[in-house]
C-alpha cells in the first residue's frame, strides 16, 4: 500500500483541509519495570526454561496506521488507511 509523502486532509484544529506530512508509526520500546515484564522475568528465573505464551488464532491482517502532521499548526494525529490488510504501508519519496 503506497501513500504519498504529503496528503491533503482535514485538520480539526485549523478547521480546514490543509496539507499534512505523513510518517510511519514505529513501535515504542517496552518498559523494563512494567508488571508483565517483571512477571515474565520471575517465571524464567532459575532452571525452569522459557515461558511459552498462549497460542491465539492469527488475524488475517492489521489495520495500517500512519501519523499525520499538519504543516500549518503542527498538530499530530493517527490515521488508519483501509481496513485489515496484509500489505505494509510504504511512503512514496
Image (tube, rainbow, N blue to C red):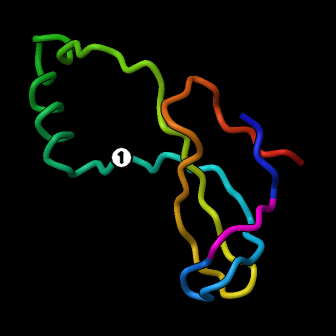
- Residues drawn in magenta: 6-10
User: What residue appears at the point 62 percent right and 88 percent down from the top-left corner?
Assistant: 14
Q: In which quadrant of the rendered view does residue 53 lie?
A: top left
Q: Position of residue 67 (x, y in %)?
A: 59, 59
Q: Is residue 37 left or right of residue 39?
A: right
The residue closer to the viewer here, 42 or 83, is 83
Screen quadrant of the N terminus: top right
Kindly state the secondary structure of the residue where label 1 is placed. loop
Q: Main secondary structure of the magenta part?
A: strand
Residue for badge 1:
30
The residue closer to the viewer here, 51 or 12, is 12
With respect to residue 40, does 78 lie above or below? Answer: below
User: What residue appears at the point 67 percent right and 38 percent down from the top-left corner?
Assistant: 89
Q: Is residue 59 left or right of residue 67?
A: left
**Residue located farthest toward the right when viewing the structure as drawn:** 93
Q: Position of residue 78 (x, y in %)?
A: 52, 60
User: What residue appears at the point 74 percent right and 77 percent down from the top-left corner?
Assistant: 18
Magenta stretch encompasses residue 8:
yes
The residue closer to the viewer here, 47 or 65, is 65
Magenta stretch encompasses residue 74:
no
Q: Is residue 47 left or right of residue 55?
A: left
Amino acid at each position: 500500500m503506497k501513500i504519498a509523502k504529503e496528503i491533503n486532509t482535514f485538520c480539526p484544529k485549523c478547521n480546514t483541509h490543509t496539507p499534512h506530512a505523513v510518517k510511519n508509526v514505529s513501535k515504542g520500546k517496552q518498559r523494563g519495570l512494567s508488571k508483565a515484564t517483571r512477571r515474565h522475568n520471575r517465571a524464567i528465573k532459575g532452571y525452569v526454561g522459557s515461558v511459552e505464551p498462549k497460542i491465539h488464532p492469527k488475524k488475517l491482517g492489521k489495520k495500517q496506521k500512519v501519523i499525520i502532521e499538519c504543516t500549518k499548526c503542527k498538530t499530530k494525529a493517527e490515521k488508519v488507511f483501509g481496513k485489515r490488510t496484509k500489505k505494509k504501508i510504504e511512503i512514496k519519496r
